[in-house]
Image (tube, rainbow, N blue to C red):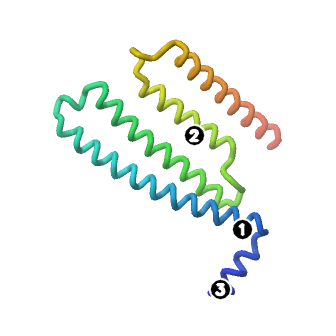
Amino acid sequence: MLEKLQKIWDSFGRFEGFEQRALQVIQILLGLITVYALVLVIIEIARDAMLGAGFMEKEVLQDTFGSILIVLILLEFNHSVHVAASEKTGAVQVRVVVLITVLVVSRKLMLLDYSTATIETLLGLSALLLALGALYWLIASGDARRAR
């Protein structure tokens, strides 16, 4: 058994082997966090469903959708780590990190209380989304040029 593990480890370079193991550990941790968040979302939705018509209030719906979006963001992040580990492409690609960041900022915008938000906050979040969109476009156009 130990010899088999040694052969697997030696098949990678030193850093590549370490990177693959680190990605696997991160994937396990993200899976645990995702399961925990999913259980909390199920409990929250069950509790909110008992509110009856109160479930349709803006704040309750925002909290529910915010929790669901957290699970979706965790799933996307875990998937990107899985792809990086299974295809041995190295660490998580920058394009995926940018897309996940766009999801996080979009979640923030969905949950933002616009009645109390300042213009500076809205302009800052808008500038952040524009910058992330421009960064994604630059990355995608660079990948397209390299592919040609």
Say which residue label 2 marks.
100
Say which residue label 1 marks.
17
Say which residue label 3 marks.
2
SS of the residue at dot 1?
Answer: helix
- Residue sitting nearer the eye, 100 or 121: 121
Discs 2, 1 touching: Cβ within 8 Å: no
- Compared across the picture, whether 3 is left or right of 55 comes to right
Quadrant assignment, res 15: bottom right
Query: How many residues crowd mark 2 within 10 Å: few (<14), some (14–19), many (20+)?
Result: some
Residue 26 percent location from the top left of the image:
57, 58
Residue located at (16% from left, 33% from top): 52
Cα separation, mark 2 vs mark 1, equals 26 Å
* Amino acid at the residue labelled 3: Leu
Quadrant assignment, res 147: top right
Residue located at (76% from left, 34% from top): 141
Mark earlier in primary sequence (3, 1): 3
